[in-house]
Image: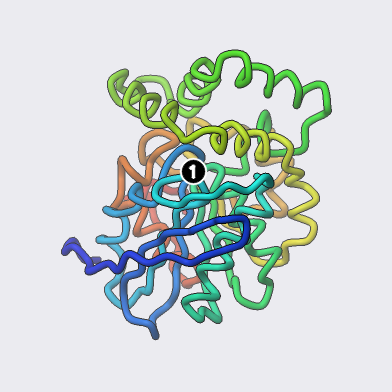
């Protein structure tokens, strides 16, 4: 691992519907390619420290989804599938023919959709504390969907606060939770609300049936339930980790980099990496 700051190129790709996707690229063009997708109301900068701890031969693409970070769009479609096309546009622009795609939170759903969209390009899908939340990711009934969306429509700040609290294990520092809340509640609108609607309406089970790549979920141990393991353990490789809260890529960048670098290799992280062997 390295702790030296990598040289990054800030790039962009144009899509239809006045969509500009901005991303950073670092590492040699011939190295193993890793695409990083941030969570809802977050941005690619969350991976800056993680990238600095990845092996120097890795080619890393960190992508701002539409209306997140520095990416901009006036489109009307805010599904996980459409976000996957944001990522696919970057992979095409960079002439990527093989990649591991890793996403945090909402980005985990997007990563699954990228795998479904590009079965010959994506070799492995990684979810960083995503896919295992049964109250959010599996398809909800229409009644459940409307109840959740009503919360965000009626009191957006309260909805964001609920997400932050739900992703914070007991003992998480209050100041840290407040910082995440302030960051996420400031997401650009209407994209922020529309994208949370897209996530709530996402049918993960249908997506998993059509996504053939192996999927590894690195889940905060205190936030993963036996019910989730029982339901998805035969499709998702759910690996409990002890690296902080739902936002662990920011809190533990070196540990996160070790997890990502271990995907697709024979060696599995040991207890010192915060995982079960």
Question: Which is nearer the eye, 133 or 74?
Answer: 74
Judge from the rendering whether residue 4 lies leftward or rightward of residue 224; answer left or right: left
Judge from the rendering whether residue 155 lies leftward or rightward of residue 173; answer left or right: right
Image coordinates of residue 33 in percent, x first then y, are 44, 74
Image coordinates of residue 182 in percent, x first then y, are 36, 25
Image coordinates of residue 257 in percent, x first then y, are 35, 58
Quadrant in the picture for residue 210: bottom right
Question: Which is nearer the eye, 118 or 205?
Answer: 118
Quadrant in the picture for residue 58: bottom left
> Is 266 situated above or below 161?
below
Image coordinates of residue 209 in percent, x first then y, are 79, 57
According to the image, label 1 marks what residue?
39
Judge from the rendering whether residue 161 lies leftward or rightward of residue 253; answer left or right: right
How packed mark 1 is, by other alpha carbons closer than 10 Å (few <14, some 14-19, many 20 or more), is many
Residue that lies at the very extreme toward the left in this rendered image: 4
Task: Give the structural element (helix, strand or loop) at label 1.
Answer: loop
Residue visible at 54% across and 20% down? 156
Residue visible at 51% across and 78% down? 96
Residue that lies at the very extreme toward the right in this rendered image: 142
> Is 231 situated above or below 64?
above
Q: What sort of colour scheme is used for the picture?
A: rainbow
Residue visible at 58% across and 67% down? 88
Image quarter hosting the N terminus: bottom left
How many callouts does the rendering have?
A: 1
Residue visible at 76% across and 22% down? 146
> Is 243 situated above or below 207?
above
């Amino acid at each position: 691992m390295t702790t030296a700051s990598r040289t990054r190129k800030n790039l962009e790709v144009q899509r239809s519907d006045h969509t500009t996707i901005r991303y950073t690229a670092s590492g040699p063009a011939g190295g193993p390619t890793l695409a990083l997708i941030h969570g809802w109301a977050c941005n690619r900068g969350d991976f800056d420290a993680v990238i600095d701890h990845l092996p120097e031969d890795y080619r890393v693409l960190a992508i701002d989804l539409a209306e997140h970070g520095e990416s901009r769009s006036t489109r009307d479609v805010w599904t996980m599938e459409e976000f996957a096309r944001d990522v696919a546009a970057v992979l095409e622009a960079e002439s990527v023919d093989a990649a591991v795609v890793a996403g945090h939170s909402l980005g985990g759903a997007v990563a699954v959709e990228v795998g479904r969209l590009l079965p010959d390009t994506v070799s492995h899908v990684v979810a960083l504390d995503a896919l295992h939340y049964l109250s959010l990711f599996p398809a909800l009934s229409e009644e459940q969907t409307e109840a959740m969306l009503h919360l965000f429509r009626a009191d957006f700040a309260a909805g964001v606060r609920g997400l932050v609290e739900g992703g914070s294990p007991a003992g998480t520092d209050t100041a840290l939770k407040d910082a995440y809340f302030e960051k996420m509640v400031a997401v650009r609108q209407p994209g922020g609300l529309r994208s949370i609607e897209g996530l709530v309406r996402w049918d993960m089970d249908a997506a998993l049936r059509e996504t053939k790549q192996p999927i590894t979920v690195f889940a905060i141990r205190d936030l993963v339930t036996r019910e989730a393991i029982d339901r998805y353990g035969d499709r998702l490789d759910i690996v409990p980790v002890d690296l902080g809260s739902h936002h662990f890529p920011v809190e533990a960048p070196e540990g996160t980099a070790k997890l990502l670098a271990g995907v697709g290799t024979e060696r599995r992280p040991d207890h010192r990496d915060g995982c079960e062997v």
